[in-house]
Amino acid sequence: MPTVGRLMSFNLDWAVAGDSKYVRSVARYQQYFPLSRRFTFGFNAQVGWGKGIGERPYPFFKNFYGGGLGSVRGFDQNSLGPVDVTGAYIGGNRQFNVNGELYLPVPGTGNDRTLRWFTYVDAGNVWGENDKLDFGSLRASAGIGLTWVSPVGPLKLSYGTPIRKRPEDRIQRLQFQIGTAF
């Protein structure tokens, strides 16, 4: 359970052989700020971009997805962004997510950081190749949750409420995650 530090990463996929020719990049920034011995603020931002090379379209199997755990909690998993003619969510070649979490101790646990509750605010969306990149279309949510570093790994339970949504959005208020911090 980090309380201080940062992680920056940049990944680049560049495919120039075969039927799929594309470039795809993901930049991520995470930082933890200790507010006191018992309170920590965590910040996460991620930007993704992809494009077909030459006359080739960007491959659909490399699309980004948004909504749910790992992006904008409070929305159904992978339910943000473009849809096809049947109404199925198909993802897109551009993505933006930002998350903030305030970690607080569970009363009665002392300085044990393996069990903490948190409040959060998330915002983000996914855009297709033909969509206008419009930050006015960002979805946002806020909520509370509980995190526990268990013997099987980090567990996180979140309850969220969308604070910026559209009528067609699919909502999932209660979400459970095993694994990473954000």
Image: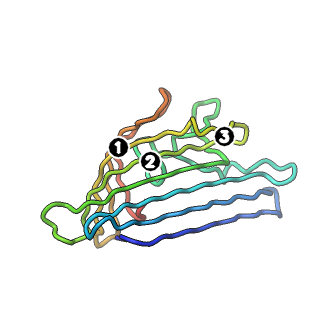
Look at label 3 and name its amino acid.
Leu
Residue density around tag 1, few if under 14, some if 14–19, many if 20 or more, within 10 Å: many
Which of labels 3 and 1 is toward the front? 3
Report whether 63 appears left or right of 149: right
Report whether 13 appears left or right of 47: right
- Under circle 2, the secondary element is strand
> Which residue matches tag 1?
160
Where residue 98 appears, as percent x and y from the top left, is 50, 52
Residue density around tag 3, few if under 14, some if 14–19, many if 20 or more, within 10 Å: some
Where residue 109 appears, as percent x and y from the top left, is 16, 67
Where residue 66 appears, as percent x and y from the top left, is 53, 46
Find the distance from the CA under tag 3 to the CA under tag 2. Answer: 18 Å
> Which residue matches tag 2?
122
Look at label 2 and name its amino acid.
Asp
Look at label 1 and name its amino acid.
Gly
Are dots 2 and 1 in contact, CB under 8 Å? yes
Task: Judge whether 38 appears above or below 62 on screen.
Answer: below
User: Which quadrant, please, contains the C terminus?
Assistant: bottom left
Q: Which comes sooner in the sequence, label 3 or label 1? A: 3
Q: Which comes sooner in the sequence, label 2 or label 1? A: 2
Task: Pick out the residue farthest to the front.
Answer: 35
Task: Pick out the residue farthest to the right.
Answer: 55
> Which residue matches tag 3?
133
Find the distance from the CA under tag 2 to the CA under tag 1. Answer: 10 Å
- Under circle 1, the secondary element is strand
